[in-house]
Amino acid sequence: MSIIIPIVQILFVSIFIFFVSGRLIGSNVNIFKRLFSVVISVSFTTFIFWYTYLRGTEHSLNTIESVVNASTLLWIGSMLLISMLIYLFFELFDPIALNDSNGRNNGKKFIIKRIIGYWRHQKRLRTVLRIAVTNGITRTMKYARNRDSDRELAIALRDTLEQCGGIFIKFGQVLSTRKEFLSPIFIEELEKLQENVTQLSENQVKEILQQNLCGEMDEVFSYFHMKPIAAASIGQVHRAILRKTNEEVVVKLLRPEVKEIMREDLSILMEFANWVTSKSQWAENLGFRDLAEGFVSSLREEIDFKIEARNMIQIHNVMKKSNLKVNIPKVYEEYSNENILVMGLATGVSLGNLAQYQIENRHEIAETLLFSYLEQALVSGIFHADPHPGNIHYDLSTKEITLLDFGAVCRLSAAQQEGLKLFFIGIQQNDASILYDGISLLVKNTREVDRLELEQAISQIILKISYVERIRTDEIIYSIFTVIRDFGLQFYPSVSVALRVIVTLDGTLRIIDSNFNMFEEAKLFSSGYLKVALKKPFKEPRATKERLEEELALIIPNLRKIPRRVDQLFKKVEDGKVILHHDIFSDKNNAKFITQLFSKFVLLLVGITFGVISVALLAISQFIYSAYAIYLNTASYLGLFLCAVLLVRLSIQAIRDMKRME
C-alpha cells in the first residue's frame, strides 16, 4: 500500500505533464511522440529526483507523499521542460513534411518503421555514393572540359548508373535520348545501358488480374495469352480477347514491386543528383538536378495507368476531327485502373522493323506522322511525348499509323505553341530575329538578357547550318540549348520535353525516309494550316456566326459600361480623389505571414526578457543576506524556466514551418 500511493502520485503528475506540455507545444501535436516524450521525461527525472534527494531519507519513495517544497516543484518543472525538449528532438529528426494545417503529407507511420526506413535509405544512399566514387565520377567531373575528359566522365557515369541498377539504369536510358542536352559522347555511352527484365510468372499475372479486374479472369476474357508481347521495367503487355464483345485487346499490367522500388529509389536518385551537382560546375550548368527531377516526375505518372488512359482519351479526342490516318487505340475504361490498362490491339508493324518491307510511299508516311505531331502540338497543345520507333506502328494494308505508349504526354500553353511555330520558321528561313522571337516565348526571364547579344549567338548557330542540304536536328537543338544555358536562361519544363520530342521524332522520321527534311516539311504544314484557317469562316458560316454572337454577348455589356466609367474617372480626377493604393496586407496570405512572424518575434522577446531579468535577479541575490534572497532565487529560477519553455516552443514551431515549406 505504501508503494502504491507514490506510484499513483507519479501517474497523476505524468497525466498533468502530458496535457500541459501538449498545450505549450501547440496544436496538432503527434500523440505518440508526445506520449513517448512524457514517459522518457517522467522516468528520467523521477530517477534523478529519487537518487539525489529521496534516496538518503528514511521513507525513500514514501517521502514523496509529504514532499511539497521547492525540490518537488523543481522535479515537476524539469519533467515538463525535458518532455518538451524530447518532443523537439523527435520533431527535428522526423523527416515527414507538414502541410499548411500541420497535417502530415506522407501519411502516418510508427516511429520504429520510420527509423528502419531511414536506416535502409541511408544504407542505399551510401552504396550509391560509394559506387560513384569508386568509378571516379567526382574526379572526372572536375576535368570535364575537353573531348578526352568527356569520354572518361561519360564512361564513369554509365558504369555508376549500371552498377546501381533499377531506376538508375532507366534514368540513364532516358538521358541517352536527351540529345539536346548532352554531347554525342555521352549519348553514345549511355545508349549501351541495358536492363535485364524478367517476365512475370503465370501466378503473378493471374494474381494481378484477380486483384484488379471487376470480375473473374474467365468472365472478362474468353482468351488470355500468358506469354507477354513485351516486358519492361514498369510493366508487361499481353494479348487477350474480351468475352463480352469478342474484340482483340492488349492488357498492360503494372509490375507489383514497381511502386515499392519507386518509393525507395526515386528519393535516392534525387539525392545522388544533388550530390553530383554540388561537386561539379559542369553538372550544375547542364541542369543535372532538373533532369533528374523531370525524370522522377514523369516516372511517377507512368506507374499510374489511370493517367495513361486519360492521356490516350485526350489525344484520341484531339485527333478525332483530323483528316490524317493516325489512330489512337481505344481504352476500355470499365476494365482499367491504376494497375491494369485494357486497350485496343494495334495492327501492323513497328517503324523499327519497317526497313524489312518494300514500301514505295515512305515520304508520305513520314509526312503524315510529322503533320500529326504538329497538329497535336501547334493546334491543340497536347501531344504524344515518346515517338520512339517501337511506339509507332504502320498497317501495310490500311496505310494507317497507330501511336502507342501514352505514359508521357506534353502540354503547351498558347504562348508556347506560338513560340514553337516561330522556332520552326526561324530555323527554316535562317532568320535569327524570328528564332529569337520564338525562343523568347519558350524561356524564362528573357528581360534580363540583351536581345542583340542573344541574336548574335543565335546567328552563329544559323551560320553553321546554312548552305547545307540536310540539317541535323539534334545538333541544332543541342547548340540552342547550349546558348540558352550560357546566357543564364532556362526553357520551361514542357518546352524542354517538346524539344526532346522533336529530336526523337526526327530520328524516327529518318528511319522511315532517310532524306526527309523535318523543317522544310514543317513549313508546308504551316502554310497549309494557315490557308485552312483563313477559309474556315467561309466554309462554315453558321459556326462562325454563332461564335461571333457568343463573343459579342460577352463584350457588349462591358462596352455599355465604358462611357459611365470614363465619366466617373474624370470626376474623381477633378476632385483629386484618384490615389494609387497598394497594400501588402490586402492579401490574406501576406497578412497571415506578417501576423505569425510578429507573434513569434514577440514571444522571442518575452522569452529573452524573462531570461535576462532572471539572470539579473540571480546575480543580485548573491549580495543579499536575508530572507528576501530566497524569494529572489525562486523568482529567478521560475523566470529561467519560463524562458526555456518559450524558446523550446518557438524552436518546435520553426521546425514545423520549415517542413511545411518543403
Image: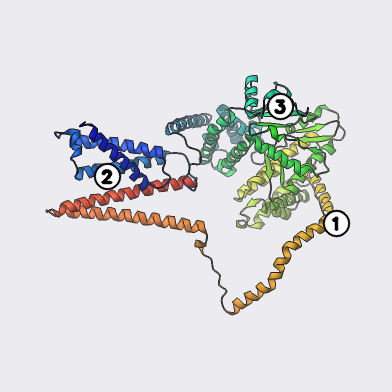
Q: Residue at image x 86%, y 29%?
A: 358
Position of residue 610 in the picture relative to residue 208 (left or right): left
Determine which residue is flagged by label 1.
Answer: 541
User: Mark 2 falls on what kind of element?
Assistant: helix
Determine which residue is flagged by label 3.
Answer: 220
- Residue 533, compared with residue 267, is above or below; it is below
The CA span between labels 1 and 3 is: 48 Å
Position of residue 349 in the picture relative to residue 338 (left or right): right
How many numbered marks are there?
3
The CA span between labels 1 and 2 is: 84 Å
Mark 1 or mark 3, which is nearer to you?
3
- Give the image quarter of residue 308: top right
Residue 559 visible to the viewer: yes
Q: Quadrant of the N terminus?
A: top left
Circle 2 crowding by C-alpha within 10 Å: few under 14, some 14–19, many from 20: some
User: Mark 3 falls on what kind of element?
Assistant: helix
Q: Nearer the viewer, residue 613 or 278?
A: 613
- Residue 614, compared with residue 470, is above or below; it is below
Residue 95 is situated, as x and y percent measured from the top left of the image, at 46, 39
- Inspect the image, locate mark 1, and give the three-letter code of the amino acid beneath it: Pro
Which residue appears farthest toward the top when viewing the image?
A: 202
Q: Which of the two discs, 1 and 2, labels the residue nearer the N terminus?
A: 2
Determine which residue is flagged by label 2.
Answer: 77
Residue 352 is situated, as x and y percent measured from the top left of the image, at 76, 30
